[in-house]
């Protein structure tokens, strides 16, 4: 990459073939920045589907630079580090991998965004608006503040701590590192209750509330899901494919149904723009016929 980007989006993913195709097809239409130099870095974990193939097929079609790698492309030492992160996060291949990518620092970007892959861009301008706000306010971290969740365990009700919900989180690389903002847990937890208390977003929020944050004059830029939904649709619950949940399984089913409908729509849009001569061809997909 010729010059260091203003913004790099980190999108770790695994077992996400259809979600990855929706994410990348929509990014080709609405995912770019017109004001800043941006890149995308994808690290695909071990998958039984064709997540890696989808990412590699679409990478060259995006309106910005995109690096796609699998775990097999990394050194044994790097793979060992990532296995430790996944183990400490109860087998989830998600936000913790963003920490590894940030530390690797191949792009040497000024700002980075950690993103979930289970979303679609529906309107352009997200990065231009968010990055401009980050710069003008001098913010170190921008994200969705989520209140605690009311839970019941063994007949006892309790409230989990608040957190940052990392569906989209923007950070100034050096200042976030100085604050100790991280998205991976230091060790695995024995129960879902503990996972919610020692949450990835909770750890990041604690860093912003520490004495060090006060000393450094840290600034947090709150954004809302209502704001994000002006630009993206978040399907959610991709993780239920690998981690069945009696609470969220129906949400997972609805999520996958919505993703397939969106993939049908995006494939149709690509065909229309190709017919009119306004856009180069995007890889075709026969995955629409697949069902779990």
Image: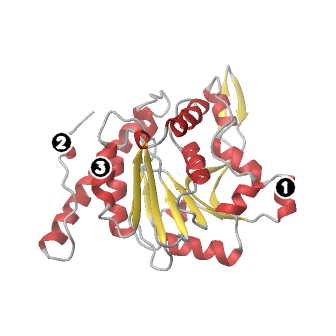
- Other-residue count near label 3 (Cα within 10 Å), few / some / many at <14 / 14–19 / ≥20: some
In the rendered image, the vertical position of residue 262 relative to residue 34, given as above or below = above
Q: Nearer the viewer, residue 72 or 48?
A: 72
Question: How far apart in space, not on screen, are marks 1 and 2 (Cα)?
Answer: 53 Å
Give the SS element for disc 1.
Answer: helix
For label 1, the residue is 212
Residue 106, position as x, y percentages in the image: 53, 57
Give the SS element for disc 3.
Answer: helix
For label 3, the residue is 54
- The earlier-in-sequence mark between 3 and 2 is 3
Image quarter of residue 276: bottom left
Q: Are marks 3 and 1 in contact (CB under 8 Å)?
A: no
In percent of the image, x 65 and y 36: which residue is there?
196
| Number of the label disc, if any, that sits on residue 289 | 2
Question: How far apart in space, not on screen, are marks 3 and 2 (Cα)?
Answer: 16 Å
Residue 186, position as x, y percentages in the image: 69, 35
| Number of the label disc, if any, that sits on residue 40 | none
Q: Is residue 194 visible?
A: yes
In percent of the image, x 21 and y 44: which residue is there?
287
- Other-residue count near label 2 (Cα within 10 Å), few / some / many at <14 / 14–19 / ≥20: few
């Amino acid at each position: 990459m010729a010059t260091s980007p203003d913004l790099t989006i980190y999108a770790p993913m695994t077992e996400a073939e259809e979600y990855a195709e929706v994410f990348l097809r929509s990014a080709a239409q609405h995912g770019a920045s017109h004001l800043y130099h941006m890149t995308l870095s994808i690290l695909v974990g071990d998958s039984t589907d064709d997540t890696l193939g989808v990412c590699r097929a679409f990478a060259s079609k995006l309106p910005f630079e995109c690096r796609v790698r699998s775990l097999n492309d990394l050194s044994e030492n790097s793979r060992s580090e990532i296995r430790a992160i996944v183990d400490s996060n109860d087998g989830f291949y998600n936000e913790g991998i963003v920490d590894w990518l940030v530390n690797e620092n191949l792009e040497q970007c000024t700002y980075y965004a950690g993103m979930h892959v289970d979303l679609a861009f529906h309107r352009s301008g997200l990065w231009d608006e968010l990055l401009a706000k980050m710069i003008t306010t001098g913010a170190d971290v921008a994200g969705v503040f989520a209140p605690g969740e009311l839970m019941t365990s063994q007949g006892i009700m309790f409230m989990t701590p608040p957190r940052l919900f990392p569906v989209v989180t923007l950070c100034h690389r050096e200042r976030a590192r100085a604050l100790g903002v991280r998205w991976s847990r230091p060790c695995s937890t024995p129960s879902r209750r503990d996972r919610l208390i020692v949450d990835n977003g909770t750890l990041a929020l604690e860093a912003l509330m520490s004495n060090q944050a006060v000393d450094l004059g840290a600034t947090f830029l709150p954004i809302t899901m209502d704001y994000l939904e002006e630009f993206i649709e978040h399907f959610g619950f991709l993780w239920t494919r690998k981690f069945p949940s009696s609470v969220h399984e129906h949400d997972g089913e609805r999520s996958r149904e919505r993703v397939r409908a969106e993939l049908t729509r995006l494939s149709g849009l690509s065909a229309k723009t190709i017919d009119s001569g306004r856009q180069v061809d995007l890889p075709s997909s026969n995955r629409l016929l697949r069902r779990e």
